[in-house]
Image (cartoon, rainbow, N blue to C red):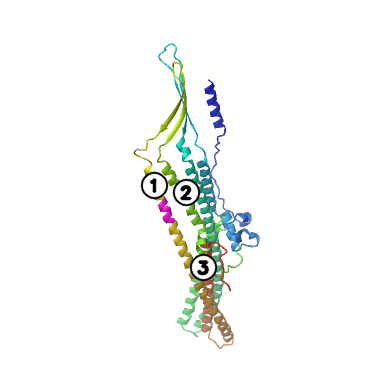
Amino acid sequence: MQLKISALVVLLGAFSGCATYAPKPLPDRVSLLQSAASITLDPARLPFRNLSSHSFNPADGLDMDEVAMLAVANNPQLRQARDALGIARAQSFAAGLLPDPQLGVTADHPTNGTVGNTNAFNFNLNYDVNALLLRSSRKGAAQAETQRVNLDLLWQEWQVVSQARLLFTQLTAQEALMAQLQTARKLLDDRYQKSQQALAAGNVTLDMASADLIALQNVERQINDLERGRLKNQASLNSLLGLLSTTHLSLVGEPHATLMDAAAVHKDLLARLNQRPDLQALQAGYRSQEEKFRGAVLAQFPALNVGLTRARDTSGLYTMGFGMTLSLPIFNRNRGNIAIENATRTQLFDAYQDRLNSAYSEVAIALENQPLLQNQLLRTRAGEQQLQVVARRAQAAFQAGNLAAADYVRLQTALLDKQTEAINLQEALMEQQIALETLLGPDLPAQAK
């Protein structure tokens, strides 16, 4: 009776700390926000120093850094990645828990009615020793896996910051391009209206008037394409920020690219690459696999299960015993799992090497492209300045009646084309800088002026 009471107390104590279940219904409405003003964020939790030290005030418009801050704080995919980190932490906690012992109870009731027989019982308390021996490898693998998920989250934050800055750059460039195209459309529309009047008066031929119409329609097509592209980028940015697609964002400021010091970047390139979250995540994943491989090797040895037995037979004889179960590693010896874990480790090794090689090549290409784009931009701006001088003289000559309208429009259109080319190159140069900062992180050494 005393043994039964003790067993009951143990069971009640075990169940007293059990978790409880509560249902969590799925949402029945959209959670996208209509305004960035309602979002609060903690700058100290942001990934980059320039973001964590930047003030966030959507009331006066969003600059490039504020857009990136908002993306990290409210991006739906990052929210799911943080949930995945919570799962990994829970799995790491579970892997560190000690295995529970097993309690077995049996009872026998004599049925032949023999005098002197009594009810028999058997209590078994067993413990899986192998589960305890493999705990360290399971725990090490789970902890490394948690580190991998955490670093993957940081790498996703890098990507979201990069995407937000990229969309900001594209939208501001599209705004500048739209202003150029609107000016060109007004100029060509005025020219077309005058050519139509001259055609009606018989002062110009049909082919000359048609050339003006073709030029005007070409600009109209560019405006239509740009409007669609701008709408698409606005929707992409709103989606990235977790806002409704119809939310209007006031973007302020213009991005300015900084030419990186290629020699200084190459000098500590491997050190910077080793600090990249995705490569560190692969390293953590490799460590986790090393622990799994070690656990598989340990599991090849005989599995041991020990226990204590307390029993009473039908004659009323009480016994206390000790039991041990040992597997015989004759056929299996866990060779299949060892081969799987070893092959997985080889795959992760090659994946890390490939990612490291790719990262090195991507940085090298980006560093080569930056000075090329910078030189093209300088030449384009020099050509723009020359055309501005010629265009001012052409305007004075046209107003004085010393220059034909077609020649005047042609010069003005050439200037607008050159200005558009400069905007596109400036955007490409900024995108190249964003790509470099995505590959290596911020605070890259700038080239001395």
Q: Where is residue 339 in the image (x, y as percent from the top left)?
A: 38, 47
Task: Indicate the quadrant where residue 176 lies.
Answer: bottom right
Q: Is residue 187 visible?
A: yes
Q: Does the segment drawn in magenta span residue 322? A: no
Extent of the magenta region: 345-351
Q: What element carries label 2?
A: helix
In the image, residue 309 above or below residue 229:
above
- Residue 202 placement, left or right of 340: right
Image: 178 above or below 77: below
Near mark 3 (Cα within 10 A), the count class, few <14, some 14-19 or many ≥20, is some
Q: 174 above or below 102?
A: below
Give x and y (percent) for residue 130.
Answer: 45, 37
Where the C terminus falls, by quadrant?
bottom right
- Residue at far left of view: 331
The disc labelled 2 sits on which kind of residue? Ser
Which residue is depicted at the point 45% across and 64% down? 361
Instruction: Give the residue number, with chain letter if any, for mark 1.
Output: 340
Residue at 56% x, 75% y is 183
Residue bearing mark 2: 288
Q: Which mark is residue 226?
A: 3
